[in-house]
Amino acid sequence: MATPLSEFAVHLRPQDNIAVCRKPIPTGADISFDGGTIHAPAAIRMGHKVAVRPIAAGEPILKYGQVIGFAARDVNPGEHIHVHNVKLGAFERDYAFASQVPAPMPPPAEQRTFMGYDRGAGRPDHLRYGTRNYLAIISTVNCSASTSKYIAERVRAAGILDQFPNVDGVVAIVHRQGCGMQYDGPDHLQLDRTLAGFARHANIGAYILVGLGCEIVQATHLIDNERLNLVQLNGAKGAPVALSIQECGGIGKTVEAGVKAVAEMLPRVNDVKRTAIPAKHIILGTNCGGSDGNSGVTANPALGVASDLIVQQGGTSILGETPEIYGAEHILTRRAVSQEVGEKLVARIKWWEKYTSMFGAEINNNPSPGNKEGGLTTIYEKSLGAIAKAGSTAMVDVYQYAEPVTAKGFVVMDTPGYDPVSMTGIVAGGANVCVFTTGRGSVFGCKPAPSIKVATNSPLYNHMIGDMDINAGRVLEGATVAEVGREIFEKILATASGEKTKSEINGVGEEEFAPWSIGPTL
């Protein structure tokens, strides 16, 4: 007797000629679908795709009602659909700018709040409301990275943080850049923008800058170019503390000066307490990494629901990873509030096509080996699943990497698909809470912003329970996407109020700061 398709797989749209396995299909299984019987000649793993209709060579493979590739040969119902019988191919995408702008969501039944940090009226809103309270040691160049870490380690070892219960910790922001680049060139300005985004982040109560002294990315340039002589905590103005190893007289003296500066700052950083803040001040950063075939079925659309709920409250949701929008950008351009906004996204897609071609690469070199192991076949499929994180509201703006995000609503930021680099830009833009979906098992964190992990399937959630915060695999077991989306939304508010994520409990998030370098190293 044939088993109904729904027992094995999810058929997402009526026009789809494939279904996504919610659990493994055994060899020789007979499956009933659409009044007929499908025979599976070989086993198919969870997250992978099964053909539900005959597909002729060259015919589009449809998932979510969209093209994810083309059949490389004739395919029979019941066959495994993957890299062995699917090929990429160009197809026309009608951008239809602003042609399907969603109506604004109705006012929420309840205006929600979170217990966060209000930095004071002297700051603009996107820099004012924090979910964490860190003191940062920011290295301007790799040459001062170790020294910056030594300062943070010395402060922690001294035990003085115990005296300041409102301070979440001292975090060293270190990286591999800062020199060997064109002065005032694109990489220099972008690194300035990224470092400044962390320095004035709403989750940073105070910071010091640490440099070597002879690097390209000078603290003075950073301060002047990014106007860091702006409002500090509690409305007090003043130049940031900037230490130079060469001027201080070496590493040891710089560490001593840094520890002294931190000790002087801690009472001021501690002089702020959590208070009720409207949820409209949540700036949500979204990302996916280690995706699988169920990412676009469970975790990503559930995060899309949470994104919509944040927007409904008056907040902001950021979608990044432009290479993982590729092939699905036409869906977002239709949701753009104007043709101008839609064209900004297309301009970034065209830039990526040109940028990758300069190195003999292709933007569609995604998915990764791990993605393919999890069932993703093409970049088009991955992108269609990835943009589900964006929910259903209008796209109100498109931002450059690490550019301050000031708009309310759903926005896109141009970032690479590589998780640490992408999230670094999104947090630099102002995200004060992040949600990260994963089907293969990412353990990412990004201080100073907490990172909530959402597993796409129950086996992963249970296997990595020490790293996963939410199990979206429940969607494959009967829960609705809306239910899991509401769970993510509530978790965002709880996390914004101070509840620690698994990545925070594990101490993850300091080494993951990874600014994007787009030019040559000189």
Image (tube, rainbow, N blue to C red):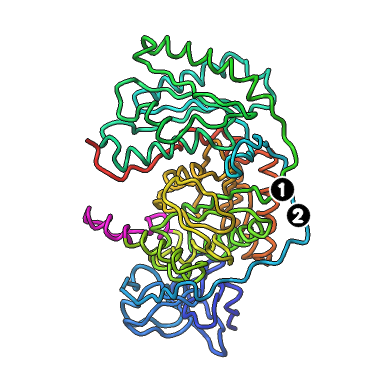
Q: Residue at x 53, y 32 (%)?
A: 230
Q: Position of residue 406 (x, y in %)?
A: 54, 49
Is residue 41 left or right of 278 when viewed as pictured? left
Q: Which residue is mark 1?
A: 278
Q: Which quadrant is home to the N terminus?
A: bottom right
At x 43%, y 71%, the residue is 330
In this picture, which residue range is highlighted in magenta?
351-373
Q: Is residue 308 left or right of residue 15?
A: right
**Which residue position holds label 2?**
111
Residue 371 colored in magenta in the image: yes
In the rendered image, residue 158, in percent from the top left (x then y), is placed at: 58, 13
Q: Earlier in the sequence, mark 2 or mark 1?
A: 2
The kind of secondary structure the magenta stretch mainly shows is: helix
Residue 475 in sight in this render? yes
The answer to which image quadrant residue 473 occupies is: bottom right
Residue drawn at (78%, 61%), measured in percent from left and top?
109
Judge whether residue 467 can be spotted in this image: no
Q: Quick check: 263 above or below 39?
A: above
